[in-house]
Amino acid sequence: MKFSKFGQKFTQPTGISQLMDDLGDALKSDQPVNMLGGGNPARIDAVNELFLQTYRELGNDNDTGEANSTSIISMANYSNPQGDAAFIEALMGFFNRHYDWNLTADNIALTNGSQNAFFFLFNLFGGAFVEAKDSEEQTIDKSILLPLAPEYIGYSDVHVEGQHFTAVLPHIEEVTHEGEEGFFKYRVDFEALESLPALTEGRIGAICCSRPTNPTGNVLTDEEMARLAKIARRYEVPLIIDNAYGMPFPNIIYSDVTLNWDDNTILCFSLSKIGLPGVRTGVIVAAPEVIAAVSAMNAVVNLSPTRFGASIATPLVENDAIKDLSNNEIKPFYQQQAQTAVALLKNELGDYPLMIHKPEGAIFFWLWFKDLPITTLELYDILKEKGTLIVPSQYFFPGVDVSDYQHAHECIRMSIAADEDTLAKGIAVIGEVVRKLYDEAK
Amino acid sequence: MKFSKFGQKFTQPTGISQLMDDLGDALKSDQPVNMLGGGNPARIDAVNELFLQTYRELGNDNDTGEANSTSIISMANYSNPQGDAAFIEALMGFFNRHYDWNLTADNIALTNGSQNAFFFLFNLFGGAFVEAKDSEEQTIDKSILLPLAPEYIGYSDVHVEGQHFTAVLPHIEEVTHEGEEGFFKYRVDFEALESLPALTEGRIGAICCSRPTNPTGNVLTDEEMARLAKIARRYEVPLIIDNAYGMPFPNIIYSDVTLNWDDNTILCFSLSKIGLPGVRTGVIVAAPEVIAAVSAMNAVVNLSPTRFGASIATPLVENDAIKDLSNNEIKPFYQQQAQTAVALLKNELGDYPLMIHKPEGAIFFWLWFKDLPITTLELYDILKEKGTLIVPSQYFFPGVDVSDYQHAHECIRMSIAADEDTLAKGIAVIGEVVRKLYDEAK
């Protein structure tokens, strides 16, 4: 069968398709696999217990008859294209209660997960624009500006035609972490960013960052965010913040920062990392014109978003349980995992040129093997042979030509969501392989 | 904020956006509304009881511990991009058991509802194609061929750029229905179809029809389907069948026809019309290369499809309850509704030039007001003022320039899924308004 250009773009092997295939194959495999590659959140008993309890309650809240239980209502009816109205109402109350943003229901839309939100937003603000100039219409190609590479692998392929990203390479700063050496932190290179011709000449459609950053666990500082917001306003483009790991849920964030929103900011939330990735529910908080556009895209692409995740989360948002769960269970769990991973890595590779990105949040570690004799794509293959899955760094640079940027071939993303045994075994394999590589190159 | 061309296309008011807005507004309104406009399936008690029972069981099937209940597993884990593996396995067994199609898991993918499937498929097979000709690459614009207009309103806007539909106008045949006059049936005009320049010159990417047809309730005959399949093979394009109302679930189909599949056929199923529209779950059965393409699009657009609908439906597919429910509850319910609607319409407008499309399936009636003095878009507004919602016919002709096709302005789609009281009230309003229009024009 013959596929369109659109189809061929989407069916070419991509970084994310390789990742997802490996994930799927690993879970189907008979061999034991140290899965440090995926983005599935950890299994945390207290979290699952609350969801199961909520699930059961939704099947029994039928004081006015079986057909009125929330579970049936949410299964048996479409929502409107904006998403489940009860959940939007609950979110509005929640955000206004905790942040004083003065949101109305017109500021919130739901999507079938965060990835779906970014498919919409990056095509809304990137690609071909038709603009009037000197009383004539002209077509301008605009990009999404990623102020701090590396960035999330899933962004790469979402444009319906071509790729429209411009990324700024980071300042790399050596830092300590809890008094220890061997860590680094990426910082936005504002000088490079503010002098970007694409930005100053009107070829940027939006600025976007994930915070905490997938893949690095970096958390952009409040100062960096304020400066980005100011630049976005100056050039009349929105600032999109991918808050999938951020405040107030799942709140996997250890540095002392704040969350802000204004009508030039598009905040994207997700239920995935509180432990509900299977329900595919994303939340966008933005100006009404953006919400109207997302709703219209929901209608055409999906008719309306899925409702089950909304139903499960509504009571937890109404009574703040989602915040307590995040603060009391989810955040401490990953903080503990991060400490364990640091100790294991230091033990395996303390005497080698490993640098760990300062763990500030999210569920990943970003490891930098300085001057590794092979690329981390090659390292990925060796580790995969030995049953340990990680993701090589080169896929996390949308908008960057990585062919002559060595740093992009020296890092890996490693999930810390696995149980302690898997984490220890996986890190042991990484240690053994990486030590040998450095030793042989001496 | 400035939106891209893509964004502007999606945010322009469309037929489907108007429909969805009216639906949403009507449900929010304080005024009583006779909702004959939407596509929500009927509330059928026996259906909801089975779903609620299944829902509860999924929260309790935890013999090996709470964390192993199906509900938790499906909430707390991503599926792979192809969709929930257990549901795909169950569907494979179900189709092979009832149809001998010899499917493997590589023949089935899930999507976030049927609309999402058509967004993928119409962009995969319509739009710009790059093909080699005389050892040079050329770009060809290909359309989706709709062999029988009118067709589903939701197809209209799904192309990521422009519209790429070519539709063939129907033969209109006067027929009887259960011995009564006043009915018509659309037939494919094969002569026009087979001599279409777009088809013979290679500018068709796929052929598509809904069966039963939304909006008309027409069911293409086995002979028509066989002939379409043959044409599709001859021109090496797939035949896409939108089976959302068809066999074996929800099986809202009253004529005596069969369902076929081969590797040039793409069959699209949905859980919506068995009563689960909120779960947004669509099923595609097709050749492995199509399934691989859909899975890749799932990964980029959605990471992976939602799982809850799959979890609810898996046991019902495994034990054939979905088939029994369709045959014993859903089909008889709509068949009864259709009889009621015919009687009510005949009572209101029996002496007027109303023609009803022969009710052969789906949950809609398609009414033709021959030589009505106003367009049905104008009729829609009058009825809306009086609290009765229907959908005017002009939106159901993707690929047709309706400006000089009078028939496209003389019909309405009316849902028969409402309860009997609403149906009676709505049809009474339609009768009163339409009688007056005809009477005044005399």
Image (cartoon, coloured by chain):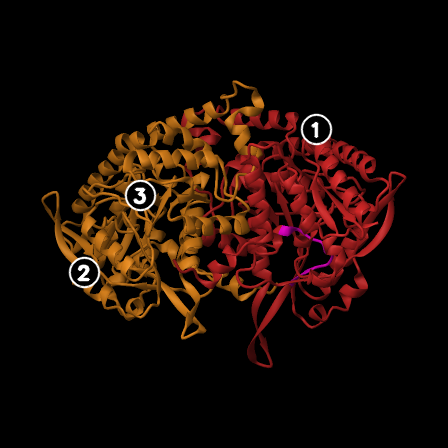
Chain colours: A orange, B red
Q: Nearer the viewer, residue B166 or B104?
A: B166
Label 1 SS: helix
Q: Is residue A121 visible?
A: yes
Q: Residue furthest top?
A: A63
Label 3 SS: loop
Disc nearest the viewer among 2 and 1: 1
| Residue under pointer 3 | A245
Residue range of the region highlighted in magenta in the rendering? B144-153
Main SS of the magenta segment?
loop
Q: Is the C-beta separation of discs 3 and 1 under 8 Å?
A: no
Task: Please state the chain letter of the residue tagged with numbered disc 2 in the rendered image.
Answer: A
Residue drawn at point x = 61 percent, y = 42 percent: B270
Q: Residue furthest left?
A: A179
| Residue density around tag 2, few if under 14, some if 14–19, many if 20 or more, within 10 Å | some
**Residue B108 image point, x, y percent:** 58, 48
> Type of residue at label 2?
His
Q: Which mark is residue B144?
A: none
In this view, A75 is above or below A282: above
Q: Nearer the viewer, residue A105 or A207?
A: A105
| Residue density around tag 1, few if under 14, some if 14–19, many if 20 or more, within 10 Å | few
Task: Please state the chain letter of the residue tagged with numbered disc 3 in the rendered image.
Answer: A
> Type of residue at label 1?
Asp
Task: Please check the rendered image and state whether residue B128 is part of the magenta-colored stretch, yes or no.
Answer: no
**Residue A372 image point, x, y percent:** 22, 61
Image position of B116 (left or right of A290): right
| Residue under pointer 1 | B421
Splitting the image into 4 quarters, where does residue B282 fall?
top right
| Residue under pointer 2 | A171
Label 2 SS: strand
Image position of A208 (left or right of A349): right
Distance from Cα at disc 2 to Cα at disc 1: 69 Å
